[in-house]
Image (cartoon, grey):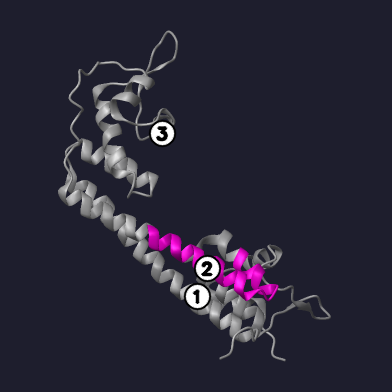
């Protein structure tokens, strides 16, 4: 059987030999045999694991990649593939949402305020009734930094302004399509500042990132299949 030195694998993957030891300690590659002098004896299978690991990281992240490879070590190929399928479905959902957001921004107008008397300072109950939003949703949007109401200095209660009311109405309009809270915050701020072009640019950047991750996922999947072939879990 042919063996690989750690430095040979590290050189091919452009990582350090200590990184190989880290991956091994995570339990995501099989423990190698040891030579009489204690050196690790990596095989073609270990090389396939390391290639797969490095290829999957960019598209699937460390956590999911490690879970997939632990399933592969157990020879549970179905569990591994369904986990990958789930991640691809999530990415597909994000792409559809970003596309819908971009289309919406082409025709978006700031939502009009309801035709009712608008107080300059409103409690969370009043703003919820005024905008037709649940108080729990408003608290969540505040927690995520999408709105920042003032606080009554005496009792600490939230005090919402007409500007907050319009932001809440805008968030309600966009929340069905924007899935990235960071992007949501930037888009809301851009639209509120009458900068639809900036909001579009932010959304286009999100779509570019999604497309890049999609390509990275397929590169990772290629190496996952190669690993499964090496382990004879799938036919060549």
User: Which residue lies most toward the top here?
Assistant: 154
Disc 3 packing (10 Å; few <14; some 14–19; many ≥20)? few
Asked if the magenta segment contains residue 104, the reply would be: no
First in sequence, mark 2 or 1: give its number.
2
Work out whether residue 132 or residue 141 is closer to the camera in this orientation and state it: 132
> Of tags 3 and 2, which is closer to the observer?
3
User: Reading the chain from its start, which is encountered first: label 3 or label 2?
Assistant: 2
Say whether residue 84 is magenta: yes
Q: Secondary structure at mark 2?
A: helix
In the rendered image, which residue does mark 2 sit on? Answer: 84
From the top left corner, tell me how far across and down residue 153 is, in percent: 40, 11
Element class at badge 3: helix
Q: Where does residue 78 sit, x and y in percent of width and height?
A: 60, 73
Residue highlighted by disc 3: 137
Q: From the viewer's perspective, is the residue at label 2 or at label 1 nearer?
A: 2
Which secondary structure, mark 1?
helix
Distance from the alpha carbon under mark 2 to that under mark 1: 8 Å
Q: Are marks 1 and 3 in contact (CB under 8 Å)?
A: no
Which residue is rendered at x = 45% and y = 70% of the image?
A: 217
Residue 34 image-quadrant placement: bottom right
- Residue contact at pointers 3 and 2, CB within 8 angstroms: no
> Which of pointers 1 and 3 lies earlier in the amino acid sequence?
3
Q: Name the disc covering residue 221, or none.
A: 1
Q: Residues within 10 Å of mark 2 (few under 14, many from 20)?
A: some
Query: Magenta segment range?
Result: 67-93
Question: CB atoms at circles 2 and 1 under 8 Å apart?
Answer: yes
């Amino acid at each position: 059987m042919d063996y690989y030195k750690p430095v040979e694998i590290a050189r091919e993957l452009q990582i350090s030999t200590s990184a190989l030891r880290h991956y091994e300690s995570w339990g995501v590659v099989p423990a190698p045999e040891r030579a009489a002098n204690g050196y690790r004896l990596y095989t073609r299978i270990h090389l396939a694991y390391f290639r797969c690991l490095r290829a999957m990281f960019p598209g699937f992240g460390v956590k999911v990649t490690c879970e997939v490879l632990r399933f592969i070590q157990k020879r549970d190929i179905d569990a591994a593939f369904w986990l990958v399928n789930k991640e691809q479905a999530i990415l597909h959902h994000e792409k559809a949402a970003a596309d819908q957001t971009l289309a919406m921004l082409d025709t978006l107008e700031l939502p009009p305020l309801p035709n009712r008397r608008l107080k300059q300072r409103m409690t969370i109950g009043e703003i919820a009734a005024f905008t037709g939003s649940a108080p729990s949703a408003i608290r969540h949007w505040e927690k995520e930094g999408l709105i920042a109401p003032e606080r009554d200095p005496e009792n600490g209660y939230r005090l919402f302004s007409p500007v907050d009311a319009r932001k809440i109405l805008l968030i309600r309009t966009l929340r069905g399509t924007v899935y990235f809270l960071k992007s949501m915050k930037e888009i809301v701020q851009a639209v509120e500042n009458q900068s639809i072009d900036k909001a579009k640019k932010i959304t286009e950047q999100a779509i570019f990132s999604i497309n890049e991750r999609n390509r990275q996922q397929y590169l990772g999947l290629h190496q996952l299949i190669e690993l499964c072939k090496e382990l004879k879990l799938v036919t060549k």
